[in-house]
Image (spheres, coloured by chain):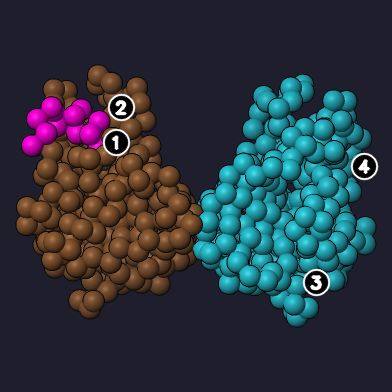
Chain colours: A brown, B cyan
Amino acid sequence: MKVLKSHKCLDGMVQYWQHDSIETKTPMKFSTFIPDGNLNGCLIWLSGLTCTDENFMTKAGAQKFLSASKLMVVCPDTSPRGLNLPQEHESWDFGSGAGFYVDATTPGYKDHYRMESYITRELYGILESQFSMKGRISISGHSMGGHGALVLGLKHPTKFKSISAFSPIVNPIQSPWGRKAFTGYLGENESSWNASDACELLKAGHKHPFPILIHQGSADEFLEKQLLTNHFVEAAKLAGQKADVKFSEGYDHSYYFISTFIEDHISHHLNAQRGSQ
Amino acid sequence: MKVLKSHKCLDGMVQYWQHDSIETKTPMKFSTFIPDGNLNGCLIWLSGLTCTDENFMTKAGAQKFLSASKLMVVCPDTSPRGLNLPQEHESWDFGSGAGFYVDATTPGYKDHYRMESYITRELYGILESQFSMKGRISISGHSMGGHGALVLGLKHPTKFKSISAFSPIVNPIQSPWGRKAFTGYLGENESSWNASDACELLKAGHKHPFPILIHQGSADEFLEKQLLTNHFVEAAKLAGQKADVKFSEGYDHSYYFISTFIEDHISHHLNAQRGSQ
């Protein structure tokens, strides 16, 4: 594991890392911001389509609030890199930059696109062993990364102390982005897709003990066709999952939206780490 | 003047604009963030080498503090675009993305690279007429843009209510970046360069009535050879120009540094707009 770049920021450090991943069998990058002083916990941030380990760190304006809350953040890349699998580099919503946080089962992809295991086991293990974050890890993300946070959090409710999401793809099996990705990573058998769909997980009885916080912009161009936020509201209600889904008037899908409400999400995860609701 | 993109942010609006410039005879872009409510004034932000109208808006994390202070910000592009002048696109520190905020006098460049007049007359006029900011305009910037803020602010102390800068090139006639740019834009006669050098302006008697705020990272890789911050400290002392030059231990030249101290700069300009020091 090596540090590629370091920048002092708000008395803490932003760092960009690279390591050889066991899960993806490729070099993987991630970034961290570690505030000065004793930490209360760690937030894993999963980014959206086309993003890297850099977007959240440069655009979210989160360091100020992470620093005040004494939470570190880690931002993994959104897919393995440096491969040349079929269709991997042909579109922005599949393959590189679009790993969808699942363990692929299709030929070629199954050997490398193991983003669920990369996050929940390998990176999680690094946070426990190298960053002393055992038992203090929460998860959040945006769009495809919001989907990732909901699915990984619901599947591993004891691993992740709290879940939040911005503009998540809550029901990917009914979304064109999700259907394209799941076909490519999980194959044509749609019943295998349910284990990677937040709404289906809720229907199947998965729950998280801490309330889930979601922000969704009402002017988000992807809301109606891709994100389907109301499906999550209904599924959570039926399942008895506590969820605070906030529709924010006039906000779109961009980091300007995230930077507006990131303070609320950091407070949410700090409350979870402190054991209050 | 047309809006290319709009994003709601912190109850205000980030907008990207384009207009046909009289000074540069090209389409010019700039961005604005306008907080909700009655405004106290406007900050012009001049960006550094290779930047566009986008960097500050996406990376500085300034909207939170601008919103609280009710200051709008406008970020012009760093040069004209869409031209094909000699050497214009051959290096990152001259030509496109590197206008240095001067009015060029050399063949070809003199017809378009009129960034000083573009900022102090054309954009300034737009802020007065289209954004109702008459008498309420301050100026700041980073690196090449810090040079621009110091020079334009010192040359026009009644136009700009206050000046601040991050990591500015304070003495470009003694800096390799500055010497290359001034040779290209102003020609070989070095005496013509002094009017675009903050230290030389101070020596020649230019002063600003409000104290100048500068932040400079001590770990900035460009400090010793290009930025020469101590030259400004000395020149300001000799000239009797009030200046608060803060050297920040361990910080580098990046936007992580800017985002750490931007709150202090916004407070500085708010104080100036309110007439307090």
Q: Is mark 1 on a helix, strand or loop?
A: helix
The verdict on a common chain for dots 1 and 4 is no
Examine the rendering and report whether any part of residue A81 can be seen.
Answer: no
Q: Nearer the viewer, residue B102 or A260?
A: A260
Q: Which amino acid, by three-letter code, is at mark 4?
A: Ser
Q: Quadrant of residue B242?
A: bottom right
Q: Where is residue B48 in the image (x, y as percent from the top left)?
A: 65, 46
Residue depicted at 75% across the width and 80% down the height? B276
Label 2 Cα crowd, 10 Å radius (few <14 / some 14-19 / many 20+)? few
Q: Mark 1 points at which residue?
A: A177
Give whichever of discs 4 and 3 has the lower sequence position: 4
Q: What element carries label 2?
A: loop
Which quadrant is the N terminus of chain A positioned in? top left
Q: Distance between the residues labelled 2 and 4?
A: 52 Å
Q: Mark 4 points at which residue?
A: B191
Residue depicted at 83% across the width and 63% down the height? B134
Q: Which chain is mark 2 on?
A: A
Q: Name the residue under label 3.
A: B210
Q: Point out which mark residue B39 bears.
A: none
Query: In the rendered structure, are the residues bearing label 1 and label 4 in contact, judged by CB atoms less than 8 Å apart?
Result: no
Q: Which of A14 and B247 is in front in this view?
A: A14
Residue A138 on the magenta segment: no
Q: Position of residue A9 (x, y in %)?
A: 47, 60
The total of numbered circles placed on residues is 4
Residue depicted at 61% across the width and 64% down the height? B35
Give the residues drawn in magenta, as a range. A177-191
The verdict on a common chain for dots 1 and 3 is no
Q: Distance between the residues labelled 4 and 3?
A: 28 Å
Q: Which chain is mark 4 on?
A: B
Q: Mark 2 points at which residue?
A: A82
